[in-house]
Image (spheres, grey):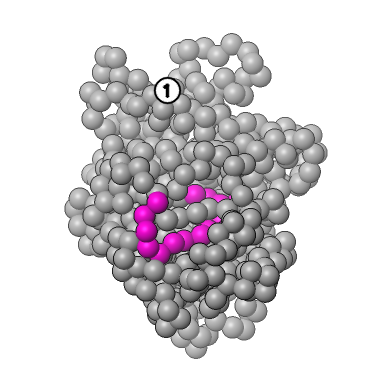
Amino acid sequence: ITMASATALQPLRNYIRQNIGHLRATPCLLISSSPPPSISTAIAGTKNPDGLSKDEKQQQQHKQQLKFQQQQNDPKTHAFVQRNIQSIQLEFNLRTVPCTISSAFPTTGSVNEAVSLAKRFGLKEGQFGSGDGLIIGIGSGAAMDLAKAVADSLFGNISSCKDGNNQQEGGSLVLAPSTLGGFMAASSNTPSLLLDTKEEMILPHLTSSWTAALGGHCRQGTVVTMDQQLSLPPLYYPLQPPKRSESLPGPSMAHYAAAMLSILIDVARALDESNTQQPIDAVLLEDMKAVASASASVLKLAAKEANESNSTVQEGDSYATAQQHLLSAIPRLSAVVDQSSHLTHGSSVPQSLANAMLPQYFPSCHLVTYLACILPGLCESLATQPASNVEGKVSVVEELTKSIFSCIDDGGKTDDKVQVASLLSWASQITEETAIPTMASLAFGTPDINTLTGSLDSYDALVGSMTGANAGIRASTDDFAVMEDVLHRSLNR
């Protein structure tokens, strides 16, 4: 996916108008997000309420999940989806078959059902350019993940980024996110995330083409569009512990910025621990520093608003500036993750923790909020590690630390000797100021650390059995030790 910046992306209707001749001739599976069902109906991943466990604790977890999903329902998002569906079907008259998703994550079952529906409607299955058809995903992150998973299953248009070619013939995928989470999912070249209801974990949707492509991945024939009506959250939410009957609000912009920093700093850690002789690519380093600066700027703006007004903010100069920072940083972060994946050959510590823990132990927590709450624990873990002293080797973590401090220092002089310990101090303070909850406060009940570590071990073994040893997704021994350390430190904060 080629995306220098979100501002260069055109709205979905413009893209369709420009390619109307080709698109009208192609059968189209139209995947969209819809508001969650009422309490009495099925919950994500379960066929009907009777299928729920009789276990009272699990029933309580499922209720929490559903309430959470309902609270995330933004009328603006639904209006965006409906407006675009009407344009596609009535104004442009494309040959579509609809498919909706209301849960926070797709499941293997929902992917299989959508693939079956697409085939019955005339989309042609075929790998590496031999497939035919159009898949359009509109709405939330779940709709983006479902659309990507169906395209990966049907068309298998995954190749190495080294090929540098996004013009492959065959089935095509168009993604039109309506939320910031949707934009993150659409921008990402990583496999879709699916909820495994049996294992109560989130697992990557890995097709054979994923494991075959080395040196980073690119989805061929993929277009991401951007509408000006993107539904964006407030810059900051005050942290008010929810009553028992309520869930946490969705993530603020500050949560997104902290989540991006968690992912970025973990990539930097992995690069520092990888082949110590290999210098890091200058372009990759610049991209990482740009994302670090943008994320830190958003957190700084959120802290300023929090200190001034202590209320949610959804307008004004700070809000507009934070929006620009996030929309430019999200595609760059995706490029960083992809470029670094073939250098580190490991798994993302924040994402692995979320995948292993979220459905079972943090059912009311948004994925982005969970990634955000990992930031201080990750920085604390890094601060306790011995520094790499290889001569001539740039420490990526230290470079990012300098970028963050030069950004938050109001143009003051940043000491070249800024330590990772300073990063920990800043991360602890900024997450508190911007109302990012602690991991312990987000947990359902009080799971003990041994139980959580056991789940992490089970997740890693499960991913290993899916991918084989060399797929670059399972944790190395070192990565697993870091995961355990970050988990311990995050829960103890």
Left or right, 464 with reference to 40: left
Kindly identify which residue carries mark 1: 398
Instruction: Please provide percent x and percent y for residue 368.
Output: 54, 51
Quadrant of residue 242 within the rendered picture: bottom right
Camera sees residue 203? no
Using the image, determine if residue 200 lies above or below residue 428. below
> Going 29% across and 56% down the picture, which residue do you hit?
210
Seen as rendered, the residue at the extreme bottom is 50
**Which segment is the magenta one?**
167-187
Using the image, determine if residue 387 lies above or below residue 391. below
Secondary structure at badge 1 equals: helix
Instruction: Please provide percent x and percent y for residue 463.
Output: 28, 59
> Going 26% across and 62% down the picture, which residue do you hit?
208
Camera sees residue 396? yes
Instruction: Please provide percent x and percent y for residue 472.
Output: 26, 48
Q: Nearer the viewer, residue 340 or 91?
A: 91
Q: Which amino acid does label 1 sit on?
A: Glu
Using the image, determine if residue 216 lies above or below residue 362. above
Quadrant of residue 406 within the rendered picture: top right
Seen as rendered, the residue at the extreme front is 21
> Going 67% across and 41% down the picture, which residue do you hit?
323
> Going 45% across and 55% down the picture, which residue do you hit?
222
Q: Which of 448 and 357 is in front in this view?
A: 357
Residue 211 drawn in magenta: no
- Give the number of callouts: 1
Q: Judge the density around disc 1: few (<14), some (14-19), many (≥20) Cα neighbours within 10 Å.
A: many
Instruction: Please provide percent x and percent y for residue 291.
Output: 52, 33
Left or right, 49 with reference to 452: right
